[in-house]
Amino acid sequence: MTASTIAAPRFPRAAGVAVTAWLALALLAGATGFLVRLPFPGPQLIFLALFVSTLVAATAVPALRAWVDALPLGTLVGINALRFIGITFLVLAARGQMDPVFAARAGWGDIATAVLALIFVAAGEPRTPLQRGLTHAWNLFGSLDLAVAVGTATAVTLQGSTPGVAPVLYLPEYLKDEPRRVWRGWRRATMPTGAWWTASRTRARSWARSGWPTPTPRR
């Protein structure tokens, strides 16, 4: 039997159920404002518990650890492209809806991590000591960025700054509704054209029912 014929480990069903439940609870918490109403340090403890439980599960559960070990390095690095979500922090700060200090630190740090992740994925598997060293340095940078973001969010919360970091706790609901807001803004910006098109269709239907108008002969 060759290595190519060995089936890759499957993602454990129990882990799939746990991830699905976590996503559903995250959306529910964002939609209801549960995390915003939770007093300090409630949100921080929840995030810490999620991080620790994920780390423990990925290392202590044999089936899950085998699945993680079988993932290509490019996949593990590339998933950090999701951290382009830092752009959202900068947008919210520009609108005056988020603390600018937190947005700058967490936003630009996440964007830098995401950009470097794409560069490392494009570069392929790290084969030389220099490439492996750069990959480890990027991993350390991304971890420190998360620590800085959590620390800054905690400091902003303790100081009672306004605006604070509440939009982060509403983030799942915000991301769900933002495409709808962008679409409405685009429709509003193009309202003259849309109104003209609606009026034209209404006129055409009226003519179809009552007969098309007779052209006035030129004199």
Image (spheres, rainbow, N blue to C red):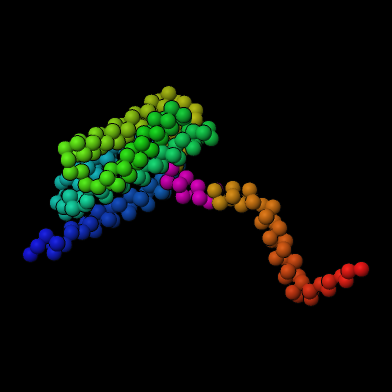
Check the picture and name the quadrant holding the N terminus.
bottom left
**Residue beneath the point at 17% across and 40% down:** 128
Q: Which residues are magenta?
A: 171-181
Q: Height in image: 218 above or below 183?
A: below
Q: Position of residue 96 (x, y in %)?
A: 53, 32
Q: Is residue 175 magenta?
A: yes
- Dominant secondary structure of the magenta stretch? helix
Residue at image location 27% in from the left, 50% down from the top = 75
Q: How many marks?
A: 0
Q: Is residue 102 magenta?
A: no
Instruction: Report whether 189 appears left or right of 142.
Output: right
Q: Which residue appears at 28% of the width and 52% of the height?
A: 18
**Extreme residue toward the right, this view:** 219
- Quarter of the image containing the C terminus? bottom right
Taking 3 as reference, is 51 above or below it?
above
Left or right: residue 109 versus residue 203 is left
Q: Nearer the viewer, residue 109 or 30?
A: 109
Residue 148 appears in the rendering: yes
Residue at 51% x, 33% y: name it.
94
In the displayed orientation, state which residue is furthest to the left: 1
The part of the image, by quadrant, that contains residue 157 is: top left
Q: Quadrant of residue 6?
A: bottom left
Residue 169 visible in image: no
Along the viewing direction, whichever of 193 and 102 lies nearer the viewer: 193
